[in-house]
Image (cartoon, rainbow, N blue to C red):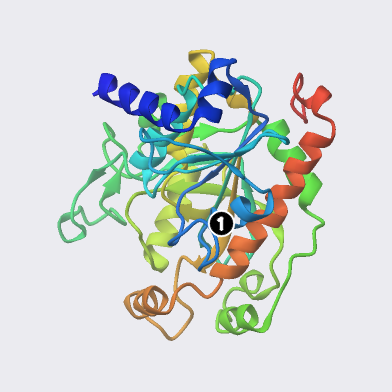
Amino acid sequence: MIKSALLSLLCALLAFPALAETAASGPIPVKVVVVTMFETGADSGDEAGEFQRWYERVPLDTRFPAPHMHHDIHMNLESGVLGIVTGMGTANAAASVMALGLDPRFDLSKAYWLVAGISGFDPADASLGSVAWAEWLVDGDLAHEIDTREIPEDWEHGYFPLFSQGPGDPERRNYNLGEVFRLDTGLVNWAYDLTKGMQLPDHETLAAARKPYVDYPVGQQPPKVIKGDQLAAMTFWHGKLLNDWANEWVKYWTDGEGEFVSSAMEDTGTYQSLTYLHEAGKVDKQRVLVLRTASNFTLPPPGKTAAEYLREEQHDSYAGLDAALENAYLVGMKVIETLLADWDKHAVTPPGQ
């Protein structure tokens, strides 16, 4: 399989002589990798997914064929900004990031990694269109599960960590199979401090979507930039009871230091691959940032069931989708431009250290 992938990569390079010549002259230094998870249709000119704004505006105008990945690699050779689409889900993200990290065409040793994607947000913490910088990444898949109808009477739910004796078991925290990662605190705080004062665009659609959340005053506010942690799970869950579980799960795995804000799928897979690549000397895992934006809420407003609201959101598209995509670019690009503006310094020492 590896031999076949390398052969495909060689054939792709030969089909693009300019790229083959670039690769032959040595690995291309990359300053920033923008990690997105999906694109809708084409990379440009149609309904935008997570990648399209980066592709069009940076612009990422040089294509590197990537038959070993979910999506071809695109880069702006002048600025040193590279962008990828990993595909949705933990497995796709882990595989794509590992493939890029081992790609001999690129030198990623000094690269900063910016994950920029949409997610569901807890309305107790922020409103639609908001942007959250995560310090903690917590996995929601590695677990035991007993059907709720069969759990002991003193259990609130039947979902609990691998090798534990039940929900909240303190002994399980002595192990870590990839359930929790902590990003560099100094870098995360630097990115947050740099962007927290940004005035994010607001509009009538967002105001109408957040208005019914009368029990969540923070969720009714205009979008803003906050710090808040990320729960990654392959299952698209929804509802108040699971939202309560998500808050408990993040607190459990972070010893009470983390605060669940955003729900997505990929980020523990992405960071797991970066951890392995760091150990191999390919990347610096202290240069990773995760930015998630609120396209939807993780629970329904008063008066609607979880099933009703989930069906509405899936059918009509997320109420905050366009704002979330735009704000991911606006906030993320401010960080990138700041890194590039003083690259000689930031190439050596990450901000916040």
Q: How many numbered discs sit on the rendered protein?
A: 1
Badge 1: few (under 14), some or many (20 or more) residues near its Cα, within 10 Å? many
Residue at image x 64%, y 76%? 220
**Hey, which quadrant is residue 127 in on the image?**
bottom right
Residue at image x 56%, y 80%? 209
Q: Quadrant of the C terminus?
A: top right
Point out residue 206 in the picture as x, y percentages from the top left corner.
Answer: 62, 78
Asked whether residue 125 appears in the rendered view, the answer is no
Residue underneath mark 1: 52
**Hey, which quadrant is residue 348 in on the image?**
top right
Q: Is residue 37 above or below residue 319?
A: above
Q: Quadrant of the N terminus?
A: top left
**Hey, which quadrant is residue 44 in on the image?**
bottom right
**Pick the front one: 10 or 310:** 10
Residue at image x 54%, y 53%? 51
**Pick the front one: 204 or 225:** 204
**Pick the front one: 217 or 335:** 335
Residue at image x 56%, y 56%? 52
Label 1: element kind: helix
5 on left or right of 78: left
Going by the picture, which residue comes out furthest to the left?
Answer: 150
269 on left or right of 57: left
Asked whether residue 108 appears in the rendered view, the answer is yes
Q: Is residue 169 above or below residue 238?
A: above
Point out residue 50 in the picture as x, y percentages from the top left corner.
Answer: 53, 56
Point out residue 59 in the picture as x, y percentages from the top left corner.
Answer: 66, 48
Point out residue 140 in the picture as x, y percentages from the top left corner.
Answer: 37, 45
Q: What amino acid is at disc 1?
A: Gln
24 on left or right of 172: right
